[in-house]
């Protein structure tokens, strides 16, 4: 026979549930990048986040010992990203165990490490040997943690929405053919077995167009109606998440949780990135995201679900390559002043569009060359990486005949020149979405036409 709970136990239970609810409301994270020569030291960052903001978790791109040490004892959750190049080695359990022992165990449990991401956006960018070893590496890292007696750290990996076939409505969404059963089904099965989230990087920023601006930015709009499931979407973020959910369901994994590894908006950009990139747009998007998260309404197909979310990014990073926008995704400047208000400061307002007028960053000189956009290799990209880009794009059905001997773009016969043509063709074929010019960090969008007298680039 059950013993009735005492008033003390009942009160304690209520207090526990209230505390959990408060923690859940504050559980929004941020991506903490360090590609800047003017950024504050990690210890100051940790102190700032703990004392001045409601952010209770960070995700970093790497396994940085200084950052892990700085967050020790703060109670802030830290997720780390193992570099993509480590994946083939990590498929070996002995290597994986040595890696965990050297890079994770010295900081655990003093630093509350939450997730280990095995690479970032591997399926989208490759190369092929990383895709082929990804699932094995995830299993090996998970096993290595258990062998090292670490049971509270979870393993996942983040995916760009390049894993989805193009579709305008969630009901029509599905994973890219060939990746669905070969890679995504085993990844989702891993998440089901380990009870870990499938992490995606949805960016309404990349789907922006002037006629869809309100829909992308959490502003009032007429919405998008999906007649096949009879749901109306009031914002692009929900539409993208439900597209992922529908794709998972079609593959047989509707029960796996979804987490948002990256999403954000640039507050400044080049001439060709206007009017998308502005302080007002960034404040409305990220502020709307925070309000949407805190409301806990979920999406039309996943109601009342709050998805763990990491905003990109914490700081403006002045050493990031690419356009001005790449250096202006931060919520804060390096001196900890807010670029705009999104409602994450302790004692601050509710986020986005409210309170005092946001201060604007100093404008960068505009890039001339009109509104056309081309995708070209970054200056420091290696020939090996660029050859991988050629192999990938040509394998995706891009017409690569022009770079073959006798073709209009064969000369000059260099890997860089051939990659430039193929990367740009792929970028345009995929609809000028900026993430389709990333190529594992080796591509950059430019407004300068790279065409020659004999080789005309798509524009």
Image (cartoon, grey):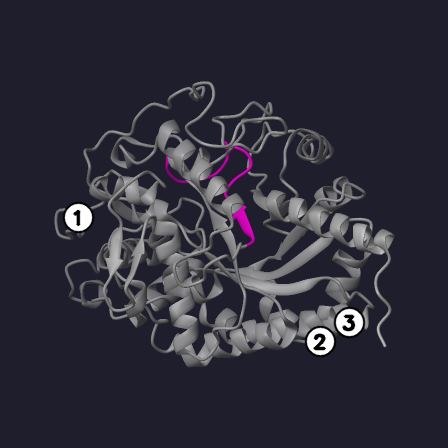
Whether residue 35 is situated above or below residue 100 in the rendered picture: above
Give the residue displayed 34% in from the left and 58% down from the top: 415
Asked whether 58 or 353 is in front, the reply is 353
Q: Residues within 10 Å of mark 3 (few under 14, many from 20)?
A: some
Q: CA distance from mark 1 to mark 2?
A: 47 Å
Decide which of tag 3 and tag 1 comes sooner along the chain. 3
Sequence-wise first label, 1 or 2: 2
Residue lying at 42% horizontally and 32% vertically, measured from the top left: 283
How far across and how far down the image is residue 372, in percent? 19, 41
Q: Nearer the viewer, mark 3 or mark 1?
A: 3
The answer to whether residue 360 is above or below residue 445 is above
- Secondary structure under badge 3? helix
Q: Does the magenta run of residues contain 149?
A: no
Q: Is residue 311 visible?
A: no
The residue carrying pointer 2 sits among few (fewer than 14), some (14 to 19) or many (20 or more) residues within 10 Å by Cα, namely some
Q: Residue 390, position in %: x, y?
A: 33, 64
Q: Earlier in the sequence, mark 3 or mark 2?
A: 2
**Residue at which label 3 appears:** 146
Q: Position of residue 29 (x, y in %)?
A: 59, 45
Give left or right: position of 195 versus 415: right
| C-alpha distance separating marks 3 and 2 | 12 Å
Numbered circles on residues, count:
3
Residue at image position (17%, 47%) is: 452
Q: Position of residue 184 (x, y in %)?
A: 47, 74
* Quadrant location of the N terminus in the rendered image: bottom right
Q: Is residue 99 visible?
A: yes
Whether residue 310 is in magenta: the answer is yes
Residue beneath disc 2: 93
Q: Give the residue at mark 1.
A: 459
- 267, 357: nearer the viewer: 357
Residue drawn at point x = 43 percent, y = 81 percent: 181
Residue numbers of the magenta segment: 308-323
């Amino acid at each position: 026979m059950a013993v009735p709970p005492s008033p003390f136990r009942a009160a304690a239970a209520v207090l526990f549930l209230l505390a959990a609810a408060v923690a859940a409301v504050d559980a929004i994270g941020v991506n903490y990048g360090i590609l800047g020569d003017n950024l504050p030291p990690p210890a100051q960052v940790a102190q700032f986040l703990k004392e001045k903001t409601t952010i209770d978790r960070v995700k970093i791109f790497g396994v940085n010992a200084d950052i892990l040490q700085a967050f020790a004892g703060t109670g802030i959750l830290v997720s780390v990203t193992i570099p993509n190049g480590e994946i083939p080695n990590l498929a070996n359990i002995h290597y994986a165990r040595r890696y965990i022992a050297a890079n994770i165990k010295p900081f655990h449990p003093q630093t509350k490490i939450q997730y280990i991401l095995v690479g970032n956006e591997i399926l989208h960018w490759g190369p092929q040997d990383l895709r082929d070893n990804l699932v094995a590496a995830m299993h090996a890292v998970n096993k290595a943690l258990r062998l090292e007696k670490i049971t509270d750290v979870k393993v996942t990996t983040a995916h760009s929405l390049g894993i989805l076939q193009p579709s305008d409505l969630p009901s029509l969404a599905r994973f890219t053919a060939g990746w669905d059963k070969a890679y995504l089904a085993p990844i989702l099965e891993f998440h089901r077995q380990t009870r870990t989230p499938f992490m995606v990087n949805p960016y309404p920023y990349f789907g922006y167009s002037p006629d869809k601006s309100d829909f992308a930015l959490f502003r009032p709009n007429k919405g998008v109606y999906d007649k096949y499931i009879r749901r109306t979407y009031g914002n692009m973020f929900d539409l993208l998440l439900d597209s992922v959910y529908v794709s998972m369901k079609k593959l047989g994994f509707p029960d796996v949780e979804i987490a948002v590894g990256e999403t954000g908006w640039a507050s400044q950009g080049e001439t060709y990135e206007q009017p998308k990139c502005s302080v007002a747009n960034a404040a409305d998007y990220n502020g709307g995201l925070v309000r949407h998260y805190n409301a806990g309404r979920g999406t039309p197909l996943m109601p009342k679900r709050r998805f763990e979310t990491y905003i990109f990014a914490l700081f403006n990073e002045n050493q990031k390559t690419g356009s001005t926008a790449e250096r202006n995704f931060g919520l804060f400047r390096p001196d900890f002043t807010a670029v705009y208000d999104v409602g994450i400061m302790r004692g601050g307002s509710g986020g986005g569009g409210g309170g005092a007028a946001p201060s604007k960053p100093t404008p960068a000189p505009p890039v001339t060359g009109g509104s056309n956009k081309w995708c070209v290799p970054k200056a420091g990209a290696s020939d090996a990486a660029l050859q991988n880009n050629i192999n990938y794009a040509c394998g995706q059905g891009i017409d690569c005949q022009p770079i073959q001997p006798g073709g209009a773009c064969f000369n000059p016969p260099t890997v860089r020149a051939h990659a430039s043509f193929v990367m740009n063709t792929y970028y345009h074929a995929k609809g000028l979405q900026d993430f389709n010019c990333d190529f594992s960090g080796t591509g950059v969008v430019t407004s300068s036409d790279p065409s020659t007298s004999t080789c005309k680039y798509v524009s």
